[in-house]
Amino acid sequence: MPRNSTPSRLELALIAEVDRQGHHVSAAQLERWRQHLWLPRTTEWRGEDGTVRPEIVRIAALLAQLSGQGRRGISWPGWAIWALTDTPQTAERLRGAAVSALRVPLDRAGLDVAQVPVGDSDDAFEARQQLAAQLLQNRRSSRLDLNSTLRESAARVGVELPPSWVPNLHHRAVTGFGARVLVGGTADVGFEEMLDSWEAAAPSGAGPMIEHIRAVQQEAELAGIDVMAPSPLADGLRGLVRTIEEADDRKLCAAVRACTRASGTLERLWERAEERPDIPQRLMADVMWDQWALAGGFAPCGTTGEIAIAMSTVQFLATPGWADDLHRYQALMDGLLATVPSGPVEAAS
């Protein structure tokens, strides 16, 4: 139904409050944000004193800030708003957005996860291998090794960091392995194949850690334990999507709140890294730097960041102990953030 083109008094009051914070917003934008469930109905805007509630002003100012930065839509900060609202309606929006983000790699390659053959037959396996190869066609592997780049920067300013064993996630050996896992799950690859791809892309000095993991896996195998079974990727993309689709509304919203807040906090801290070398030193010395920050903690607005947040959400929901580790890391980041001046409105606030 088309809305009245004349803004209401309450809309004009909100526009004025946002303007006082240095951002411009129109009545048409407010209506669009209501339709996306980023803002509640106008009847819910007033506080007890009759003015626009401060939290409504904060959300509108954030949305105006994001809209004015030339980004492609609001992106995952909009997920954070849905998660904070935490209603069945916003949880459904959140679920759909996260599933769509997870499917992007296959969608870009023209593949439908529902058509990926299942089963242990040779024909099904070969078909999955071909689909994985198709997934990598025309894909440009980034030459950026984020871990090495950040560590080299730290070394230049005299910051000493513990050794790292994380491989370059953009290395062809890793992306090739990842494509096979995404299409067919961990059953389509061997543990040794995973270690081989890791070793090919790992930084120097990672050999002892890789050998230790190989020894642990061999002991587990003798004991009849499949160490890859608990992984959210055990069933490939199907398993990732199922984790999101089957999650309870409240748990899904809680997971996204935690993951978006953590990524927002990490971004704010990293903006201060050059002037505060102790910040990257503290962040990179923690196990969650390797397990989360490098693997998806840095989440720019846009498709890449949405995929990262969706993957972190799956980890939060499905990997034992991962949520507790992220909460602990958040406490570390909050402590560091308390030592730097406050910045502009952030999605994680």
Image: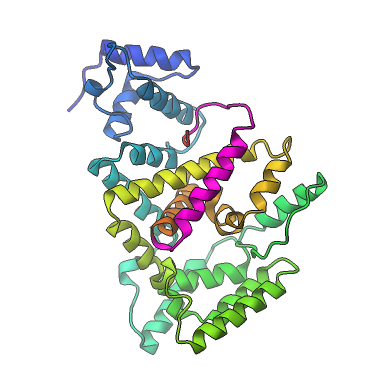
Where residue 157 appears, as percent x and y from the top left, is: 81, 44
Asked which quadrant contains residue 182, the reply is bottom left
Q: Which quadrant does the N terminus fall into?
A: top left
Please name the residue shown 42% across and 36% down the image: 74
Front-most of 12 and 323? 323
Please name the residue shown 69% across and 62% down the image: 164
Asked which quadrant contains residue 268, the reply is top right
Front-most of 87 and 172? 87
Where residue 155 appears, as percent x and y from the top left, is: 80, 50
What colour scheme was applied to this rendering of the protein? rainbow
Q: Which residues are magenta?
A: 318-346
Extreme residue in the left direction: 1
Q: Is residue 144 visible?
A: no
Q: Going by the image, does 153 lie left or right of 236? A: right
Relative vertical location of residue 319 with respect to residue 177 in this rendering, above or below:
above
Relative vertical location of residue 230 with respect to residue 225 in this rendering, above or below:
above
Relative vertical location of residue 198 with respect to residue 19 in this rendering, above or below:
below
Please name the residue shown 43% across and 83% down the image: 126
Asked whether residue 331 is drawn in magenta, I would say yes
Front-most of 215 and 88? 215
The number of numbered discs placed on residues in the rendered structure image is: 0
Q: Is residue 290 visible?
A: yes
Where residue 253 appears, as percent x and y from the top left, is: 34, 46
Front-most of 113 and 9? 9
Q: Going by the image, does 251 lie left or right of 137? A: left
Asked whether residue 345 is drawn in magenta, I would say yes
Where residue 230 appears, as percent x and y from the top left, is: 42, 71
